[in-house]
Every structure is written in C-alpha cells, then in structure tokens.
Image (cartoon, rainbow, N blue to C red):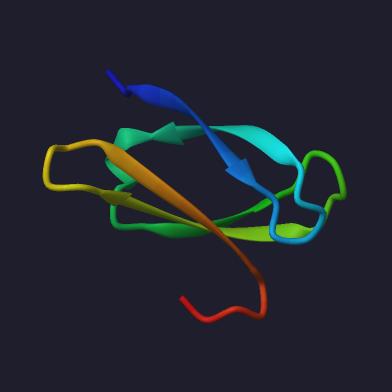
Amino acid sequence: MRSLVEQKVSCPYCGESIEILIDQEEAGEQYIEDCQVCCRPITLQVLLDVEGHLIVSAHDENESI
C-alpha cells in the first residue's frame, strides 16, 4: 500500500504556499508539478533525512538542483 504524505512548499515564482501529496516511495526522485496558483512548472526534489522524514524542495525550472 502506498503512503501519501501532504507537504507544503512555497512556489518559487509567486511565493504562495501550496499543498502537494508526495508518495514516500518517490524519495530520491525529482519531478515537475504545476503551481496551483500561478500555473507555472515547479521542479520538486524529494529526499529522506537521516531520521526517515521526507524533505521536499521546490525550484523554478531554470534553477539547477
């Protein structure tokens, strides 16, 4: 069974806080999701910290990760 976790991130374009659902199995992955406010593409990087907690970082499409 997949475990979805709700995370809040700030859009790198408009600055709005948006909620996204992250599958814990996506740790180590990077993908693109459109901002729910300004509709611009956000690059999301999903990582696990040493304690097993999800860390999600949001970047604009031109920012290198």
Say if 46 sits above or below 37 in the image. Answer: below
Compared across the picture, whether 6 is left or right of 1 comes to right
Screen quadrant of the N terminus: top left
Say if 49 sits above or below 3 in the image. Answer: below
Closer to the camera in the image, 30 or 64:
64
Q: Where does residue 18 sit, x and y in percent of width and height?
A: 68, 36
- The extreme front residue here reads 15
Q: Where does residue 48 sit, x and y in percent of width and height?
A: 24, 47
Figure label count: 0
* Residue at (29, 57) in percent of width and height: 28
- The extreme left residue here reads 50
**Quarter location, residue 59:** bottom right
Say if 59 sits above or below 62 in the image. Answer: above
Q: Where does residue 56 sit, x and y in percent of width and height?
A: 43, 48
* Residue at (58, 43) in percent of width and height: 9
Compared across the picture, whether 43 is left or right of 38 comes to left
Compared across the picture, whether 47 is left or right of 63 comes to left
Say if 52 sits above or below 29 in the image. Answer: above
**Quarter location, residue 16:** top right
* Residue at (36, 46) in percent of width and height: 55
- The extreme right residue here reads 38
* Residue at (20, 47) in percent of width and height: 49
Compared across the picture, whether 16 is left or right of 3 comes to right
Closer to the camera in the image, 40 or 1:
40
Q: Where does residue 45 sit, x and y in percent of width and height?
A: 44, 58
